[in-house]
Amino acid sequence: MARGRRSSMLTAIDIGTDSVRCVIAEPTEAGLDIIGVGKSKSTGLKRGVVINIESTVSAIRGAVEAAELMAGREVQEAYCSITGSHIAGRNLSGVVAVRNNEVRPDDVARVLKAARAVRMTEGRDCVHVLPVEYAVDDIHELASPLGIAGVRLEAKVHMITAAKTAMDNIVTCCNREGIKVAGLIFSPLAAAETMLHPDEKELGVILADIGAGTTDFSVWFNGGVIQTGVVNIGGKLISDEIAVALRSPRGEAEQMKIKYGCAMSQLVDEDDTIEVPAVGGRKPQQKKRSYLAEVIEPGLEEIFTSIGEQIRRAGHEEHVSSGLVLTGGTARMSGIDELAEQILGIPVRTGEMRESEAGFGGVTNAVQDPTFAVAVGMVKLAARDRQVVEPSNAPTTRTPWYYRFKEWVKEAFVD
């Protein structure tokens, strides 16, 4: 598709296992106006990873063209989400000498470069380098060290890496549709922009995005990301389990999960029954709704147990006093917060879009569904630091939205 000249609008494409979602926003004096929204069924991904280029290109085209039609604009470049079990996060640190006894932007650039100067495993590339905190001499836990007097600057960062082939495939799919990739963003980082409150990020919180193919999570403390991870289970696997257990078509199983599903069988009235469509034109059968919950519960238990184990292994269980915030389509299931709270032993809530607080206007009613949290969060991230973003169409596109000074962003992200 031939696309027109570049405009001031921002576009985000959330490329998921089950669906591709596109959001087009335009910067205003008050913040952002959402002017286009599109969604398309996706069949070209498995657990967040592209396995069929043509099917993924078709899904991207469907979502983007729907958003373009609503916005009355053409998309030339976009920010894309990335997820999958290949994603990995690690905490690193770097130390440099302060050149002029006062921390300046070039000192920050050098310490961030030192922190990320680790040997990358072959076949992997960096997606994000996120500053966690700084220290100048004996002054620790600084959000920004600029202007602080001292001779020694230390930075702690959280680096997120991904399989280079997975990154390349996302860029290839967009390029085939005539869209330049401005940056790749790990899904839960974007969702956090619309789902988490600033005080939760300060006190410590987990954000878990239950997608169709995987469940991605991030742990925030003192306003920064200290851990990220992926659980290789999502809503689609649970739907598949329902289809097998109830001998029902997969599409019908998904609908039953959404309409009648409950995360805990003990919360379902024993007398409740549901009609279960059968395969091959057979007659529908009556089943207890509690049986459906019994099929659903183990998958969700495994998700929350795995998140808890990963956080404990990292030693961050004491840094999540605000609890867990759930997002994604499966997060809307009845009883899911009770189950997560029972397993993790922390407060749990289902996330709600905060676009009104974030300065969003326009067709906000079209993105109220929490499944749009990632796409909306991406345009917010892009808008916040657009002045320092240098888009590239290379597969190794960097995404330095968390840094504030253009003169040292370029240096900090040189390979």
Image (cartoon, rainbow, N blue to C red):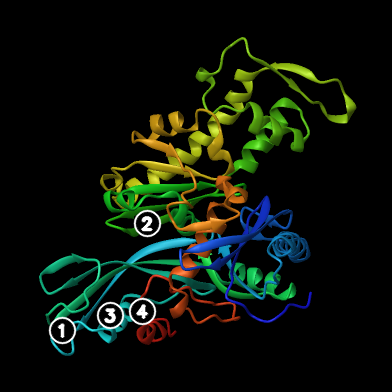
**Which of label 2 and label 3 is nearer to you?**
3
Observer-side mark, 3 or 4, equals 3
List the residue tagged with mark 2: 227
Q: Earlier in the sequence, mark 1 or mark 3?
A: 1
Q: Characterize the local packing of mark 2: few (<14), some (14-19) or many (20 or more) Cα atoms within 10 angstroms.
A: many
Q: Quadrant location of the N terminus?
A: bottom right
Q: CA distance from mark 1 to mark 3?
A: 11 Å
- Alpha-carbon span between mark 2 and mark 1: 30 Å
- The mark that comes first in sequence, 2 or 3, is 3
When the figure is inspected, residue 160 is found, relative to residue 374, above or below; the finding is below
In the rendered structure, which amino acid carries the disc numbered 3? Val
- Under mark 4, the amino acid is Ala
Confirm whether residue 304 shows in the render: yes
Q: Secondary structure at mark 4?
A: loop
Residue 163 pos. (x, y %): 55, 68
x 51%, y 25%: residue: 264
Q: What amino acid type is highlighted by mark number 2?
A: Gln
Residue 81 image point, x, y percent: 57, 62
Q: Residues within 10 Å of mark 4 (few under 14, many from 20)?
A: few
> For the residue marked with disc 1, what is the amino acid?
Glu
Compared to residue 225, the image places residue 178 above or below, namely: below
| Residue corresponding to mark 4 | 117
Q: CA distance from mark 2 to mark 3?
A: 22 Å
Q: Which mark is residue 108?
A: 3
- Who's the residue at 61% across and 56% down the image? 48
* N-term-proximal mark, 4 vs 2: 4
The reply to whether discs 1 and 3 touch (Cβ–Cβ < 8 Å) is: no
Q: Which residue is mark 1?
A: 102
In the picture, measured across the screen, residue 156 lies left or right of residue 21, that is left
